[in-house]
């Protein structure tokens, strides 16, 4: 960006150029920008000097673009349009009817999306923005209404309600589950192809942790596919690539639909949970409160506190 400003002299030169080129007149550009016409002429001249070529053909009543000027206008217009769209999107964050829910790609994809049509039917006037993130955002500074986090329900400056306790069991496609040879005990799962989740930022348990919980600590699982997003892990499992971690609040619906099979008797309850989180700094706006209540109502009467009920 610094190199660009060296090339054009000043960002203001591009603003003035765009107005003059769009309106075909330095006088009209000056009127739109609330400056004097000589100031527009000076800015355009300085931009042309910085670039080393003419951008306009000047006549008594109007100015027309050279081929270089037309090329620059097309790119400047596209960039300004993108900036305008970005600013408009950011400004929407402060609207009282605009609710942002930040969660993992997997949660948005496999928990929210199957329920979204029911939400929209119930609340057609609420604009819900699903923000997928590979990290835990600062919900206050980033103006996020609600977020989904894994933990024990205690985050500084935040209130929380339990969506689901963390329960993990092996899942795979029905074909892989049916064809698995000698899958009679947990240690025998070591000999199957495993799909590993390796998130770069979030703290998540691994296959090694799962095996250790069941007392299998002598061998570290090494082989198999490694992915950095849980949504991809589930897609790979459904495609028959092997056995994956099944976080039950996301996979039970897929099991019911026949897209996955699981070993229910091999579930591990970690003591943590997945929580809906919001800031204590101020009261939730009415629409955010409605979204919060709707999400918790979808949890089928679960205890919306900590996994141990405290």
Image: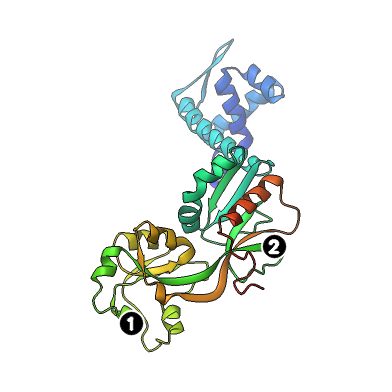
Give the residue number, with chain letter if any, for mark 1.
185
Q: Quadrant of the C terminus?
A: bottom right
208 over 118 or under it: above or below: below
Q: How many marks?
A: 2
* Residue closer to the observer: 48 or 154: 154
> Looking at the image, which residue sits at the far front?
301
- Looking at the rendering, which quadrant does residue 298 occupy? bottom right
Horizontal relation, residue 210 to residue 177: left or right: right
Horizontal relation, residue 215 to residue 160: left or right: left
Residue sitting at x 69%, y 62%:
159
Dots 1, 2 in contact, CB < 8 A: no
Residue sitting at x 31%, y 71%:
224
The answer to whether residue 229 of the structure is visible from this angle is no
Residue depth check, mark 1 versus mark 2: number of the one nearer the observer = 1
Residue sitting at x 60%, y 25%:
19
Dot 1, how many residues are within 10 Å of its Cα: few (below 14), some (14-19), or many (20+)? few
Q: Which mark is residue 65?
A: none
> Looking at the image, which residue sits at the far bottom?
218
- Looking at the rendering, which quadrant does residue 191 occupy? bottom left
* Residue closer to the observer: 90 or 171: 171
Give the residue number, with chain letter if any, for mark 2.
159
The mark that comes first in sequence, 1 or 2, is 2
Question: Where does the image place residue 185, in percent across and percent down from the top left?
Answer: 33, 82
Horizontal relation, residue 80 to residue 262: left or right: right
Question: Where does the image place residue 100, in percent across and percent down from the top left?
Answer: 61, 49
User: What kind of element bears circle 2?
Assistant: strand
User: What is the spatial separation of the Cα atoms under label 1 and label 2, in whole angstroms?
Assistant: 41 Å
Horizontal relation, residue 189 to residue 9: left or right: left
49 over 97 or under it: above or below: above
Question: Where does the image place residue 121, in percent across and percent down from the top left?
Answer: 55, 40
> Looking at the image, which residue sits at the far top?
61
User: What kind of element bears circle 1?
Assistant: loop
């Amino acid at each position: 960006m610094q190199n660009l400003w060296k090339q054009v002299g000043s960002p203001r030169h591009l603003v003035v150029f765009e107005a003059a080129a769009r309106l075909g007149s330095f006088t009209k550009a000056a009127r739109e920008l609330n400056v004097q016409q000589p100031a527009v002429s000076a800015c355009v001249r300085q931009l042309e000097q910085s670039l080393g070529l003419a951008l306009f053909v000047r006549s008594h009543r109007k100015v027309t673009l050279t081929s270089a000027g037309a090329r620059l206008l097309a790119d400047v217009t596209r960039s300004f349009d993108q900036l305008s769209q970005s600013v408009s999107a950011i400004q929407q964050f402060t609207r009282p009817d605009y609710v942002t829910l930040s969660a993992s790609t997997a949660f948005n994809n496999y928990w929210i999306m199957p329920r979204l049509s029911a939400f929209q039917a119930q609340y057609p006037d609420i604009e819900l923005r699903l923000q997928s993130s590979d990290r835990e955002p600062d919900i206050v500074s980033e103006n996020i209404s609600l977020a989904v986090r894994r933990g024990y329900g205690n985050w500084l400056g935040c209130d929380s309600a339990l969506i689901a306790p963390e329960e993990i069991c092996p899942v795979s496609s029905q074909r892989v589950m049916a064809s698995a040879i000698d899958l009679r005990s947990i240690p025998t799962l070591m000999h199957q192809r495993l799909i590993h989740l390796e998130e770069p930022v979030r703290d998540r348990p691994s296959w090694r942790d799962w095996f250790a919980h069941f007392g299998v600590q002598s061998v570290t699982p090494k082989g198999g596919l490694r992915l950095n997003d849980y949504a991809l892990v589930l897609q790979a499992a459904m495609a028959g690539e092997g056995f994956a971690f099944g976080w039950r609040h996301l996979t039970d619906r897929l099991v019911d639909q026949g897209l996955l099979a699981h070993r229910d008797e091999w579930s591990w309850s970690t003591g943590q949970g997945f929580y809906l989180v919001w800031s204590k700094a101020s009261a939730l706006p009415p629409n955010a409160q409605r979204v919060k209540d709707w999400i918790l109502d979808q949890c089928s009467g679960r205890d919306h506190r900590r996994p141990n009920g405290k």
